[in-house]
Every structure is written in structure tokens, then in C-alpha cells.
């Protein structure tokens, strides 16, 4: 079974009995999404020969955090986006109040899934919780800086910091969770994976900026050119389209180099990185 | 040192290095509040002779969750309250976007504080995280039901369920966290404490409904009669003021009875319950 399908089945089970919030949470979580974060977690676990059952909770948790962040990002007070995954955004479908609460509930649920994952030892659960709570906090921080600097002139270093927090933190965490549930992953592997995660995290977000300019709405699943419309600082706005493309290609190349250091066969991680690098939306 | 002062000192330390969100988070968390939840945690721990250092992380975490929920509850899309703790609500001071993010960040931070509390064993941390993530989820659920039933006629059972989730869940969790860090707290004690927590949780919220009707704004620290203005279902609206008063007094009496079962000296918990029962705001 492919990883996206696997995490979808688990998400479907996790989101079944949450009373009045169930409908809005299911609407946003199960409506699509590429599941790259869950796939990263599973692929790292597989690379280190871990039983994938041990990664199911982590894969769900990162996707729940990702889904919560999208619901809140789309709110009128934030990025004010009406379309997500080719359907009305959560607040357009259920109203702002229920959308805020669905996001709040998903964040709590993500951590509850990890804390209650009885397949993992207490210590491993604590390690995964430390990583995911920190990443989730960084995402809120990144969005806070991003909204604070809209319409202002900033330099590439500041923009890199925003991107690292908004997108890199959770992608990096997805990689780390895969490593944490893998017994055979040693300290040196973890350091190399952290560099790998940092590089693909930043590459991914610069690529997002580029795709936002280049990709029509029907493929992107959300409004084209929405960053420029909101005066958001982006790599294309700061460096131009061509230099932004070279920059994310360079980072993906560095990510491939990081994989060379790993003590295990990295064919699958290379395949996944190639897929990320070649994505069109 | 009293418990409120103790938790304030720890909250001040926890909230010091969170970048762009620090100011809004400190503004909302450190601006006041009765710290009843932290006091419950400390008092239970003290009742079972636990070292209070072990309860500091838990006490901070429940207050961070409480503060996050108030920031989001006050938002225009939710309860639309402009005043909190006698100062402009977070969204009035920092704008809606930063208020949403400050709340989001506080929720993540609360769980990070617990996951990183190295004074507690991994298993105890997992136990506290399971309790707090679940309570936090229930709060979002309770607020979701509450907003869904505004302006509708509901029965007392439904209202009790809303109150239990919105307020009872976190108060109950505050009691439970105090028990979880106390080694000498046995199974029977925990069951009695759960009943105690449930009774004071519901009593507290019915009392809140009553105080909202009776207490002037300058003492309440927020707008008087705000529930009725919003067509929110309340105990006074359903049962009348006198029957609502009898109901919360009856529940506090039950809470005192629950304490009789405990295997330890309950003087402090009785004192705290008396303080809750006698509060004017």
C-alpha cells in the first residue's frame, strides 16, 4: 500500500468520534492533500527497516498539525483564502468560529494521538512529542512573522527564517519522527537527516513560492498568485523567478548530498526527493 | 509562597524567548487571572505530600491552555468580547491574526512544557500529556457545541454537557495532574478526586453563569450580562437565578463529600473549595 493511502486510512479511523467537531475536521483533513509529510515519516522509517506500524501514529500526527495550520492560515484575519484542495475553505463551509475550533481541536488531537500511541515506549513518545510540539510552535511563530512583515521590504535572511519556521519546521519534524521510531537509526544518521530535512524544507517552500506564480488555479487547488496579491514577501519577489528556481534546485542537490552520509540504502529517500523536486503543485 | 505567585513566576520564565509571539502571549498570560487551575494542581500535590517542584510544569501547562482558550473565545468570530482582565482583549491589542497565532502558540507551548519536564519520568509525562491533550480537545468541542446551540432552546442535560466540556474538563485535568505527580496517591484516591473535580467543575461554571448576571463589570473584569446579550444558553436562563444558585451550592456540597473518601488530610482542598464557593467574580 502506498504511504498516502496508508495514512489516509489511519486518519479516517482517528477522526470518527469527536462529536460536533468531527464533520469540520474530517472535511478539512480527508479532502485531499499530498501527504508528503506522512510519506517522509514512513519513508525514513522504512529506510531504517522499522516496522511501519510504529510510524502510523507519527504520520497521522504530522498530517493533523499540517491540516490545522492550513485551516487557520486560510481564515479571513490571516491569509484570507477561500479555496483549499479545490473546495471551499473550512471557514467558508462551516463559518469562522467552527473553523477556528476545528483547527484548535486538530492541534490537541495530534498530540493526543502521539501521547496515546501504545506501540511506542513512553520515552519514544516523549521524544516525538518534544519534536512535534516544538515544530508546531515554530509554525505559529513563522506565520506571525510572515503576517508582520507583509508589505514591508525584508532581506533574504529574514525570509529564509520565516520559510524555515512556517514550512521547514514541520517537514523537518516529519523526517525526525521517522528516525525516532527506528531503532537502527544512529546519532550520525540523525544529524545527516536533520541537514537533509532542513534543505528539502527550505527548497519546498521556495518551490511553493515559484509554483504560486507559475501554476494555474485548477492544478494548484487554490488561488494563483495569491502571495503577490497579499504583498507577501516571497523568493520570486526578492530574487526573481530564475534565481529562485536555481536556489531551490541547489538546495535539493544539497539534500541528495546529505543522503550520501547515511549508513543505509537511501534509494527510497532519493526517489521521494526526486518526486518533491519534480512536483508541479 | 502562595500558589498563584508561584505559577506566575514560572510562567514568566517559560514565556521569555518565543520571538514575535512573546509579547502577545505575555500580555494575555501574565495580565492577571485567578490561577485557580494551577492552585488546584498544587493543592492536590501538596495534599499528597509531593514535592511542589514536580507540579510546576503541570501548573504552568494548565494555565497556558486556559489562557489560549480565553484568547480564542474572545475573538470576534467567537464570543466577541473586547475586555479581558480589565484590559483590551488580545485581538484588540494585537489584531485578530496575531491573537489567533498567540493562542495557537500557547496551546503548543503548554504541551511542550509537559513533554520537556525533565523532573518527571517519561511515563508520568505521558500520563499528564494524555490528560491535558484530551481536556484541551474537549474544551474546543464544548465551545463548538456552545456556539452551535446559541439562540436555540436546549435542555439542562445538553447545557450540563457543554459546561462539563468547556470548563469542567480543564478543572478536572488540573486536579488529575496534581494526582499524577504525587506518588502516594492511590487508585481509590484518584477516583474520589475525579468525582470531586467533576462536581467543582460544573459548580464553577454554573456559578460563572450566575456571576455574569449579578456582578458589575469593574469587579468581573469583563462585560456584565454578556451571556444574555449573545443569547447563550445558561443555567439562570433555563432554571432561573435561585434554582441555579441552589444547584451550584449542592454541587459544592457533593464535592466536600467526595473529599471525605480520601486517604489523606484534606484541610487544604476544603479551604480551596470554600474559596471557590465564596468567590464574587
Image: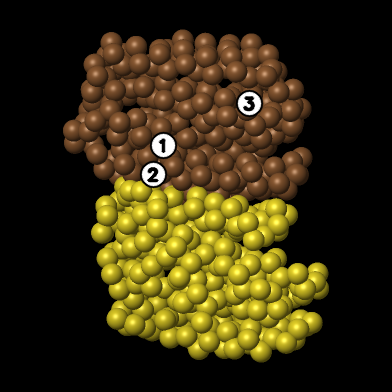
Chain colours: A brown, B yellow
Give the label on residue A165, or none.
1
Query: Element at badge 3?
Result: helix
Mark 3 belongs to which subunit?
A
Taking B121 as reference, is B240 above or below it? Answer: below
Marks 1 & 2 on one chain: yes
- Residue of label 2: A141
Report the chain holding disc 2. A
Query: First in sequence: mark 3 or mark 1?
Result: 1
| Residue where numbered disc 3 is placed | A189
Distance of label 3 from label 2 (alpha carbons): 28 Å
Asked if labels 2 and 1 touch by Cβ distance under 8 angstroms, the answer is yes
Q: Quadrant of residue B254?
A: bottom right
Picture quarter containing residue B197? bottom right
The one of B77 and A8 positioned closer to us in this rendering = A8
Q: Are marks 3 and 2 on the same chain?
A: yes
Report crowding for label 3: few under 14, some 14 to 19, many 20 or more residues within 10 A (C-alpha).
Answer: some
**Residue at horizontal 52%, vertical 78%?**
B3
Q: Is residue B240 visible?
A: no
Q: Position of residue B196 (x, y in %)?
A: 67, 77
Chain for disc number 1:
A
Camera-near label (3 vs 2) is 3
Label 3 or label 2, whichever comes before in sequence order: 2
Spatial CA distance of label 1 from label 2 is: 7 Å
Amino acid at each position: 500500500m502506498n504511504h498516502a493511502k496508508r495514512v489516509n486510512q489511519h486518519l479516517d479511523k482517528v477522526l470518527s468520534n469527536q462529536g460536533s467537531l468531527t464533520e469540520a475536521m474530517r472535511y478539512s483533513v480527508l479532502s485531499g492533500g499530498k501527504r508528503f509529510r506522512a510519506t517522509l515519516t514512513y519513508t525514513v522509517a522504512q529506510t531504517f527497516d522499522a516496522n511501519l506500524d510504529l510510524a502510523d501514529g507519527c504520520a497521522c500526527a504530522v498530517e493533523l498539525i499540517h491540516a490545522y495550520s492550513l485551516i487557520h492560515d486560510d481564515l479571513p484575519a490571516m491569509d484570507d483564502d477561500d479555496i483549499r484542495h479545490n473546495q471551499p475553505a473550512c471557514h467558508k463551509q462551516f463559518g469562522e468560529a467552527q473553523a477556528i475550533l476545528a483547527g484548535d481541536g486538530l492541534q490537541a488531537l495530534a498530540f493526543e494521538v502521539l501521547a496515546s500511541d501504545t506501540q511506542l515506549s513512553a520515552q519514544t513518545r516523549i521524544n516525538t512529542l518534544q519534536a512535534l510540539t516544538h515544530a508546531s510552535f515554530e509554525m505559529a511563530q513563522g506565520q506571525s512573522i510572515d503576517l508582520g512583515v507583509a508589505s514591508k521590504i525584508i532581506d533574504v535572511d529574514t525570509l529564509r527564517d520565516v520559510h524555515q519556521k512556517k514550512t521547514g519546521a514541520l517537514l523537518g519534524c516529519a523526517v525526525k519522527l521517522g528516525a525516532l521510531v527506528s531503532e537502527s537509526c544512529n546519532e550520525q544518521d540523525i544529524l545527516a537527516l536533520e541537514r537533509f530535512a532542513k534543505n528539502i524544507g527550505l527548497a519546498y517552500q521556495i518551490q511553493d513560492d515559484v509554483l504560486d506564480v507559475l501554476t494555474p488555479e485548477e492544478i494548484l487547488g487554490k488561488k494563483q498568485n495569491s502571495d503577490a496579491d497579499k504583498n507577501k514577501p516571497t523568493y520570486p519577489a526578492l530574487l526573481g523567478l530564475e534565481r529562485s528556481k536555481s536556489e531551490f534546485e541547489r538546495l535539493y542537490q544539497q539534500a541528495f548530498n546529505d543522503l550520501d552520509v547515511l549508513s543505509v540504502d537511501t534509494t527510497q529517500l532519493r526517489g521521494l526527493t526526486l518526486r518533491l523536486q519534480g512536483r508541479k503543485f
